[in-house]
Image (spheres, rainbow, N blue to C red):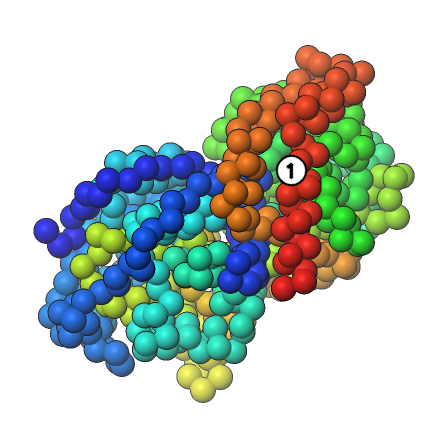
């Protein structure tokens, strides 16, 4: 039945990676937020067949509607808790334009990765994965099994003219989304707007005001940061007469690690390279030991939240809403505080230790893959690709970035794409809250081309302030993309998977023990010896070879 999940016998391999960037036909470069690669791909004996004469005959290659006879497909993507996808105006408007409707499967964002892996393991697939953060290994594994369809022929044969134009003008992007077997199994987010590799950290402006700390006096070194956190702890900056302030908030250090590791010259949380092209494993570096020492100091003096390793992001946000947090990470500070956008909460300035001349700062690569894929269950791959291709045009990107015109914005000048905001409905605290009810492209890596034109005329004082904060506090430090985690050969992937299966768990456990003092830092040498015994040197060797291949390709 069209639109239902269909069955296929397949296996599942779980990974955690997101962002990728260029490589040749034998190696694809991936920029990721996660750290590990699994391997495992089976080689098929024949090329998968994509589409059919019948499904192609129902498609108009140009204009709307996309299909002559209406079809219904199934789509899986994460629910961020703002609005049911079936009720979102972006999907409703796109259905009118395209003649394609969807049945949605939307697990909550915080459990989506698990649900996605279960779907792959079950053999019952949606027709489309949307904003599903398909990993590098998902593509290699499920693409080689025929579960994910190769899209390059459909792209080149006229079913994705907008995307093809982008790929033709930017060959590096095509290489970035092409797997080692020469196929394109997922489509990207092409982001020409973003600076942040990870969401920034923000200071609580109310705390700073209470302590008479001016923005010019914000910490620039690890010692200055320590001193300010002590003041957050001791001087009652929330003014309630209680010692309930939490100077630095975190969830398992995943939200602050990348910013603070830079204080010791480390650009990534896992594998990174230096200026000479030498590959390093961050968790075995002296700088990582110094990071652990510093975090243990913060923990022991109650400057780091003592629920860091047990709380959820929502629990951290609840503390922010109670005005307890001094320094924390989020996309914007008011996402944690609640309320409306404000310029009172300044962005964290990357700090440096005495070990380096300047902090290492990572910047977003501008490309994320795994945003859209078509499965073997899909009865209309040509129509599905034409549908998503609209998101790589200005009009389609606007529809799914801001919702249909007339709700949150209206056009002032069609020629130069100048727009203006409509009045915000009274039931919403911010336009972001409202936008999250209009489109699925909110807090998810959705397929699109995010060009500067989308924001033309819409930047207000808060947006301009954020731009200035970025310029002064991120771009001023000559940021670079974090180390590319590469597509490996199947043999290399298999070995990495085996080596890291237990190593990553051990590293995570030991990080928590070192920081909380359950394991004294005097145990570093034993930790290092254990990680080396588990294969860290071999991991560096494999990635060095892959990185050298990429540089020379």
Left or right position of 342 against 17: right
Please, which residue is most extreme toward the bottom here?
415
**Residue 29 percent across, percent down from the top left:** 57, 56
Q: Is residue 16 visible?
A: no
Q: Is the residue 30 above or below the residue 253 in the image?
A: below
**Residue 309 percent across, percent down from the top left:** 58, 23
Residue that appears at 71% across and 37% down: 282
Residue that appears at 38% across and 45% down: 42
**Residue 159 percent across, percent down from the top left:** 30, 73
Query: Helix, strand, or loop for circle 1?
Result: helix
Q: Nearer the viewer, residue 541 or 423?
A: 541
Q: Nearer the viewer, residue 541 or 188?
A: 541
Q: Is the residue 239 above or below the residue 399 in the image?
A: above
Residue that appears at 65% across and 45% down: 543
Please, which residue is most extreme toward the front here?
45
Image quarter hosting the C terminus: bottom right
Q: Quadrant of residue 22?
A: bottom right
Q: Is the residue 334 above or below the residue 504 in the image?
A: below
Q: Is the residue 103 above or below the residue 248 in the image?
A: below
**Residue 444 percent across, percent down from the top left:** 43, 51
Residue that appears at 74% across and 24% down: 528
Task: Name the residue beneath numbered marker 1.
Answer: 539
């Amino acid at each position: 039945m069209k639109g239902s999940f269909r069955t296929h016998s397949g296996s599942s391999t779980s990974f955690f990676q997101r962002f990728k960037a260029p490589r040749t036909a034998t190696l694809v470069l991936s920029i990721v937020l996660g750290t590990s690669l699994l391997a495992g791909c089976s080689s098929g004996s024949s090329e998968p067949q994509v589409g059919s004469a019948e499904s192609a005959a129902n498609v108009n290659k140009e204009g709307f509607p996309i299909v002559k006879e209406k079809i219904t497909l199934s789509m899986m993507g994460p629910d961020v808790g703002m609005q049911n996808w079936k009720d979102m105006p972006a999907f409703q408007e796109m259905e009118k334009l395209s003649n394609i409707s969807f049945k949605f499967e939307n697990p909550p964002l915080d459990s989506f990765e698990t649900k996605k892996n279960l779907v792959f393991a079950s053999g019952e697939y949606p027709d489309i994965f949307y904003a599903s953060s398909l990993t590098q290994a998902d593509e290699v594994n499920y693409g080689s099994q025929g579960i994910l369809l190769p899209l390059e022929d459909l792209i080149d044969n006229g079913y994705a003219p907008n995307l093809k134009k982008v790929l033709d003008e930017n060959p590096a992007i095509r290489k970035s989304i092409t797997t080692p077997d020469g196929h394109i199994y997922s489509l990207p987010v092409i982001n020409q707007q973003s600076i942040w590799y990870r969401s920034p950290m923000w200071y609580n402006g109310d705390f700073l005001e209470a302590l008479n700390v001016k923005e010019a006096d914000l910490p620039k070194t690890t010692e200055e940061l320590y001193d300010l956190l002590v003041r957050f702890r001791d001087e009652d900056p929330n003014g309630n007469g209680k010692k309930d302030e939490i100077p630095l908030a975190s969830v398992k250090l995943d939200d602050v690690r990348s910013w603070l590791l830079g204080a010791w010259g480390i650009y990534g949380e896992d594998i990174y390279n230096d200026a000479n092209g030498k590959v390093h494993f961050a968790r075995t570096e002296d700088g990582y030991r110094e990071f652990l020492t510093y975090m243990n100091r913060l923990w022991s003096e109650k400057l780091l939240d003592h629920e860091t390793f047990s709380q959820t992001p929502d629990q951290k946000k609840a503390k922010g809403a109670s005005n307890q947090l001094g320094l924390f990470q989020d996309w914007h500070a008011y996402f944690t505080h609640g309320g409306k956008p404000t310029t009172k909460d300044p962005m964290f300035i990357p700090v440096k230790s005495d070990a380096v001349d300047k902090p290492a700062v990572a910047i977003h690569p501008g490309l994320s893959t795994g945003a859209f894929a078509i499965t073997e269950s899909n009865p209309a791959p040509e129509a599905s690709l034409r549908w998503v291709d609209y998101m790589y045009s200005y009009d389609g990107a606007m529809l799914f970035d801001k919702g249909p015109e007339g709700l949150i914005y209206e056009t002032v000048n069609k020629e130069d794409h100048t727009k203006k905001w409509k009045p915000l409905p009274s039931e919403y605290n911010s336009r972001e809250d409202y936008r999250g009810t209009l489109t699925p492209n909110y807090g998810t890596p959705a397929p699109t081309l995010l060009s500067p034109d989308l924001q033309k005329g819409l930047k207000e004082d808060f947006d301009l302030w954020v731009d200035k904060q970025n310029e002064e506090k991120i771009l001023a430090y000559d940021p670079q993309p974090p180390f590319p985690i590469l597509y490996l050969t199947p043999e290399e992937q298999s070995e990495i998977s085996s080596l890291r299966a237990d190593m990553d768990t051990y590293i995570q456990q030991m990080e928590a023990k070192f920081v909380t003092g359950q394991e004294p830092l005097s145990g570093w040498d034993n930790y290092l010896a254990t990680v080396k015994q588990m294969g860290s040197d071999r991991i560096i060797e494999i990635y060095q070879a892959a990185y050298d291949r990429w540089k020379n390709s």
